[in-house]
Structures are given as structure tokens and as C-alpha cells.
Image (cartoon, rainbow, N blue to C red):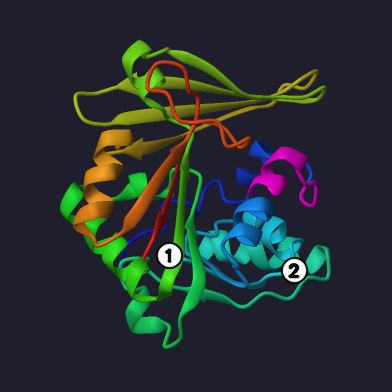
Amino acid sequence: MKRDKYQDFADRYDLFHGEFGELKPVYRTFFQKLFVENKIHSVLDCACGTGYDLHVLYSLGCEIVGSDISDSMLVRARKNLKSLDIKIPLHKVDYRMLHKHFNHKFDAVVCLSSSILHMPDKKEVIKAFLSMRRVLRDNGLLVLTQGTSDKQWRIKPRFMLASSRKDFARLFVIDYMERGARYNIIDIWHGKPNLKAWYVDYDQMLLKDDYAKLLQLAGFRKIRFYGSYKFEPYSKKESDVLIAVAHK
């Protein structure tokens, strides 16, 4: 049986966001505006992880469904949602197989926080995009986000501070390879002799031009790219995040 690679740090993953239940206003407003403009009412988060984005989308009044391939992340998501008395259906599904699990269509599918980068090659990325497209209604919306931008890939910073609070800091130490990258993640609790480290491997990095091509090959149209959650146009030179929005 294939080991769940999130098993060892699912319970610490939420430290990216702080206390579960805190909503970042700019992030929430981005989805609120996007969903209102596109008449989005039902949403599938196909890489829901520990449920942070499920809570954000739920707060907008949408009908939400979550899925993930990791048992450990889903266990944590259920605990998180229960702590806020939120009931959202959760399913264990590989996002390349969504069309074989869900027999109804969604207004939007979201795949957030670099989740698509877990695919080993572009063939599997297209397979995932095709499956996402098949569970969308006509003119439905696909939203992808990642923290690695063209700017970062060009500059290749070795160290990045991912989170910094009074009691805790999370540091990325990044090993860049020809096609992918390893994010070594170091968690430090201030004032305590407590340090933990783990890593995430991305076998291939996808950037703006890759997404444009692969989404078109999967049949998506009206593909737009943003460089912030304030709808700023994406800049290969300046943007620190990459957001793709495409229509079926």
C-alpha cells in the first residue's frame, strides 16, 4: 500500500495559516468577487488538504464539497471543520479521477496552494485538468494558485520566510533542480527547544507559459493570470504569486 506522504506533518500543515478559522480579508474578497462575477454557487475544492480553503469558500455562502488524495489531510480537515461546527462533504479522490467519483457538475473547481505541482510530468497534469473540466458545468470556472512564480524561478532565492509570528516561524530552504524543486521546511517555536523539519518535492515546476499551454490542451478557454489577490495582472518579472483562472 502506498504510504501517505502527508502522514508525518498533516497536523502541522495549518501553521501556514495561523489559527484555523481566521479568514484573510484580501484572500476571501478575491474569491467573493470572482464568484459573484461568474455566478458561482457550487464549488469543488479538489485538493482541500486540512480544510483552510473550504472554510473560506463556505464563508461565501457557496455549496462546498472537498476532496483530497491524502487520508491524513482529510482526517485533519474533519477535525478542523468540526471545531467550527461546519459540515462539508469530504471525499478521498485523486484529482485525476474526479469524473469517475462525482456524477454531478460544479460551477467551479479550485486546486490551490501549488497542489497541481505534485504531478510527476505534464502528461499527468493534462490528465488532471481534463478530469477537472469534466466535472464542471458549461462555462464553469477552474482556479489554480501557487506561491512559486516566474520571478522566484528566475531569481532562485535559497531561503524564504513562509510564516512569522510571536511564537512561531516557518522557513523554506529551497533546493532548485533543473525541472523541479525541494522545499525543505523548518518549523521553529520561539523560546522553546523545539524544531521540526520536513520537505515537499515538486518533480516539475509549472509557470505561466506552461499553464497557458496545458490548460488550452485540456480544452479550457478565456484563461487569465493574476499576480496577486487584488486582481493585479500577472508579471513574469514582478509577481510573487501565480493565479490562473480558466473557463470550460
Q: Residue at (36%, 14%) from the top-left corner?
A: 156
Three-letter code for the amino acid on which mark 1 is drawn = Ile
Report the residue marked by disc 2: 61
Three-letter code for the amino acid on which mark 2 is drawn = Gly
Question: Dot 1 surroundings within 10 Å: few (below 14), some, or many (20 or more)?
Answer: some
User: Looking at the picture, does residue 29 appear above or below residue 148?
Assistant: below
Residue 100: image quadrant is bottom left
**Quadrant of image for the C terminus:** bottom left
Q: Magenta segment, which residues?
A: 20-30
175 relative position to 72: left or right: left
116 relative position to 161: left or right: left
Residue 171: image quadrant is top right
Can residue 25 be spotted in the picture? yes
Q: Residue at (55%, 60%) from the top-left corner?
A: 48
Q: Residue at (45%, 68%) from the top-left corner?
A: 140
Report the residue marked by disc 1: 69
208 relative position to 112: left or right: left
Q: Nearer the viewer, mark 1 or mark 2?
A: 2
